[in-house]
Image: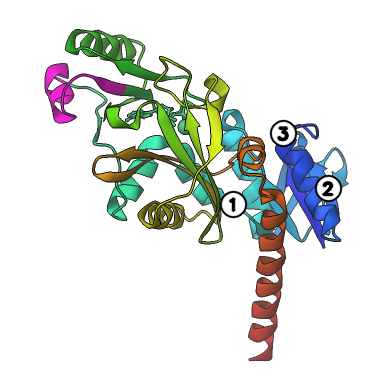
Amino acid sequence: MKIAVLSRNKKLYSTQRLVEAIKKRGHEAEVINHTNCYVVIEKDRPNVYIGDHEITGIDAIIPRIGSSVTFYGTAIIRQFEMQKVFTTVSSLALVRARDKLRSLQILSKAGVGIPKTAFAKYPGDVQTLIKQVGGAPLIIKLLEGTQGLGVVLAETQKAAKSVIQAFYGLDANILIQEFIKEAKGADIRAFVINGKVVGAMMRQGQEGEFRSNLHRGGVGTPVKLKREEKSVAIKAAQALGLHIAGVDMLRSERGPLVIEVNASPGLEGIEKSTKIDIADKIVEFVEQSVHHTDSKKKDKIGV
Ligand code: ADP
Ligand code: MG
């Protein structure tokens, strides 16, 4: 099989590991920089090009689309989807997962536990909004922030009010969220592939930091998940339509609460802390899926 990793940089840990795993399992690997691709659309011919070279013969793609190029990246994925190339993340699931508000709406409908969250574009009364999520301390999040940037802990009512007003003044889209204090600056990342948790780590933020992101100095250690945590992670990935997902949960007094579902979860933190070969499991999943699609196609012709 020829499997392409859509990535802007061959040297990134996740990209390198995926290429290694693809080759190790006996396939051909290609790294395609999606930001260099362009699409040509005409009747019945959804093509993808780099320069004057048409990209053909790809059996599956593993997109690693950074959050700064979601729009462009999804357009490229969609083009491959129209060619019936298998993708580990569909363009639709990627768009859903990249919007924190839309994700929480979908999760809440699916019955997945989430911290109580409010969203308003023009709040008449900020005080009421604060009260809705249980008052201060509370969390304020930029809708499209990543890596812990754009997440603020407002410890007092006064701080909350002025930060919220400042964000509104900048015309930013923000979520106002209940602060889960008992999580103690830690969260759980469950790596889900095809409806199974294949690895999990606990990330603990630095001393005095409520954000556990590895990019903010958090440290990951392997963790054994409780049965409920596993099933919540699987349900969250499924609700968003993600075959592969990094589901982030907080351990709260009322059970696991999902704060985020990552559609392009990094491999470095999870592989290094758990020593599990996640890249290999991703490629194994691609093999199964492509074969499955092949047999479905044959079935259709056969009938
Ligand atoms: P990002 O996309 O920037 O990673 P997150 O929503 O994942 O944003 O938040 C970053 C970190 O902040 C989380 O990993 C978690 O440690 C902490 N955090 C986020 N939301 C809450 C919350 N409601 N209560 C307590 N801690 C939170
Ligand atoms: Mg996060």
Which numbered mark, 2 or 3, is in the foreground of this view? 2
The reply to whether the magenta stretch includes residue 129 is yes
Q: Which residues are magenta?
A: 124-139
Amino acid carrying mark 1 in the image? Val
Q: Looking at the picture, tell me which residue is in the foreground, 213 or 35.
A: 213
Q: Residue at x 34, y 32 (%)?
A: 183
Q: Secondary structure at mark 2?
A: strand
Residue labelled 3 has its Cβ within 8 Å of some atom of ligand 1: no
User: Residue placed at 76% from the left, 37% from the top?
Assistant: 33
Q: Are marks 1 and 3 in contact (CB under 8 Å)?
A: no
Name the amino acid type tagged 3: Thr
Residue at image coords 72%, 57%:
283
How packed mark 3 is, by other alpha carbons closer than 10 Å (few <14, some 14-19, many 20 or more), is some
* First of labels 2, 1 by sequence position: 2
Relative horizontal placement of residue 135, taking residue 278 as reference (left or right): left
Mark 1 falls on what kind of element? loop
Residue indicated by mark 3: 35
N-terminal of the pair, mark 1 or mark 3, is 3
Camera-side residue of 172 and 10: 10
Quarter containing the C terminus:
bottom right
Q: Is residue 199 left or right of residue 32?
A: left
Mark 1 nearby-residue class (10 Å; few <14, some 14–19, many ≥20): many
Spot occupied by residue 193 in the image (x, y as percentages of width and height): 57, 56
Neighbor class of circle 2 (other Cα within 10 Å; few <14, some 14-19, many 20+) is: some
Above or below — where is 55 with respect to 207?
A: below
